[in-house]
Image (tube, rainbow, N blue to C red):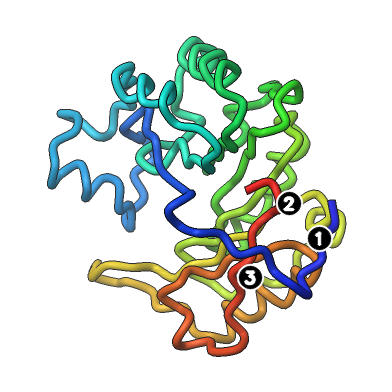
Amino acid sequence: MIYSVKKPKQVDLDDMITLNPVIGCSIGCPYCYARKMNQRFKFIPDFSIPTERPKALERLKSIHNKTIFMTSMSDFSGWSQEWREFVFNEMKRNTSNQYLFLTKNPKKLAGFDCLDMNNVWIGVTVTRNMDVHRISEMTNLIKSRHYWVCFEPLHEDIKAISPSLKGKLDWVVIGNESGIRAGKIDAPDSWILNLSDQFPNTPVCIKERLKERLGDSWRNEYPNEF
């Protein structure tokens, strides 16, 4: 899908919300903000064990015409098959929203099919060149009408991504690492702009905290569906 970026679509952040039917992740990334959030607020006893939250899903009944990030506190590959099916059935009762999912392990979702839903967005996280393979795994193994990539936190200058992969993506998010973690990697502007320039015809959203640094090169673009 090709988008014009001459007049980027601007989205009010109030229209984009998070909903976490699952909290917890067993991957254990050292920069994980979700684990730190759980340490602070004690949502679940052990963050390394993904935990289903039926009460959180009840909110879905009262949310309409929003873009909802469903995995801000989990990795989609860590959801049980039964719970994925249950959540998607609930989503089918409320089709006015756009639903975003993110994973670092698309192989665990091989065979997952959500082609019958126009409002589901499946994405992968890429932080280094060694992670780029996740894009092809996602598009080859998971059946979705919309694919996106989150390059956050950006920990390396991502080299040229093949046109065949870029042509399958409907949205790109680029962000720097936040927080005060020991060993934190502060991505230079050149890394961020190199990525942004690789997607001239795809909506690119660079996190707002980079706006002042990048000036006129900052992009805040969203798919028309949002």
Q: Examine the rendered structure and indicate whether residue 156 appears above or below residue 92.
A: below
Residue at 61% in and 74% down:
219
Q: Nearer the viewer, residue 20 or 151?
A: 20
**x and y percentages locating residue 217 in the rendered image:** 62, 85
| Residue found 76% across the figure and 35% down from its top | 145
Asked if one can make out residue 103 in the rendered structure from this viewpoint, the answer is no
Question: Mark number for residue 3?
Answer: 1
Give the amino acid type for the residue marked by disc 3 in the picture.
Ile
Camera-nearest residue between 24 and 60 = 60
Q: Are marks 2 and 1 in contact (CB under 8 Å)?
A: yes
Which is more foreground, mark 3 or mark 2? 2
Determine whether, in the image, residue 16 is placed left or right of residue 198. Answer: left
Along the line of sight, the residue nearer the viewer: 221 or 198? 221
Which numbered disc, 2 or 1, marks the residue closer to the eye?
A: 1
Q: Which mark is residue 158?
A: 3
How would you rate the neighbour count of disc 3 (Cα within 10 Å): few for under 14, some for 14-19, many for 20 or more?
Answer: many
- Which numbered mark, 3 or 1, is in the foreground of this view? 1
Q: Disc 2 on helix, strand or loop? A: loop
Q: CA distance from mark 3 to mark 1?
A: 22 Å
The amino acid type, in three-letter code, at marker 2 is Asp
CA gap, disc 2 and disc 1: 8 Å
Give the residue number, with chain letter if any, for mark 2. 170
